[in-house]
Image: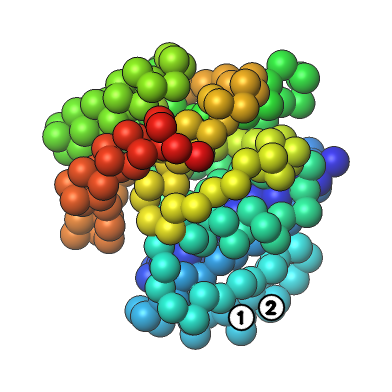
Amino acid sequence: MLLSIVIPVYNEQDTLFEIIRRVLDSPIELDRELILVDDCSRDGTLELYPRLESEFPNAKIRLVKHTVNQGKGAALRTGYAEARGDIVLVQDADLEYSPQDYPKLLKPILDGRADVVYGSRFVGGDEHRVLYFWHSVGNRFLTLCSNVFTNLNLTDMETCYKVFRADVLKNIRLRSNRFGIEPEITAKVARGGWRIYEVGISYSGRSYAEGKKITWKDGVQAFFYILRFAIAD
């Protein structure tokens, strides 16, 4: 069985090689391929790619580059289209989410109980960095709004960690280019009637000084995407 790990990359020169190392060191027995989708980085990340083969000689890594910056949603759609695995997992290129959580994320699918698994930052007893109060409030509010329309009881709709059986992704059409991809995926998975599980994960969030990109404007846009995908495909 093959696990496809889709890694959207935008201006991550300081963390790219480290997250690849952590992904390759994650304690899972599945074969894995890494799909890096660079969304037109401008910080020096592009200069790192020629070193991938020498740095990770035994890894299955494929690189796709966008010539124009389009947003995380577009990067995910590109990565999903490239994935060849039986299971597809999303991994951000920063160091906020730990690949050490892969076993618990994959278990419900490998056990045959789930089609989709979300990794929640708000359930379970795993460690997490203490940062922004209003970010937490905003995430919980957006999840609540999403749940109202999807009739799910998720605790963390905006999480990076979403894992899919490959046939789920093949049966939904995604449109969003930016952070609207999260509510869109959730709405369409709910509409498809697939079995969704949620597991607690650790979280080491970045501050803005450390490179965090999402802002309150993205939250406002996500709210309108929740409304949009509640009434349209």
Residue 130 visible in this rendered orientation of the protein: no
Q: Give the crowd class for mark 2: few <14, some 14-19, many >=20 residues within 10 Å.
A: few
Residue type of the residue flagged with mark 2: Ser
How far apart marks 2 and 1 lie (CA) works out to: 5 Å
Which label number is shown at residue 51?
1
Where residue 218 appears, as percent x and y from the top left, is 25, 49
Q: Which residue is mark 2?
A: 54
Which residue extends farthest front? Answer: 232
Judge left or right: residue 115 versus residue 175: right
SS under mark 1: helix
195 relative to 210, above or below:
above
The reply to whether the C-beta atoms of the residues labelled 2 and 1 are less than 8 Å apart is yes
Judge left or right: residue 175 versus residue 227: right
Instruction: Name the quadrant containing residue 133.
Output: top left
Where residue 132 appears, as percent x and y from the top left, is 17, 38
Where residue 151 appears, as percent x and y from the top left, is 44, 15
33 relative to 137, above or below:
below
Quarter of the image containing the N terminus?
Answer: top right
Residue type of the residue flagged with mark 1: Arg
Q: Residue at x 24, y 43 (%)?
A: 219
Q: Residue at x 75, y 38 (%)?
A: 167
Instruction: Name the quadrant containing residue 83.
Output: bottom right
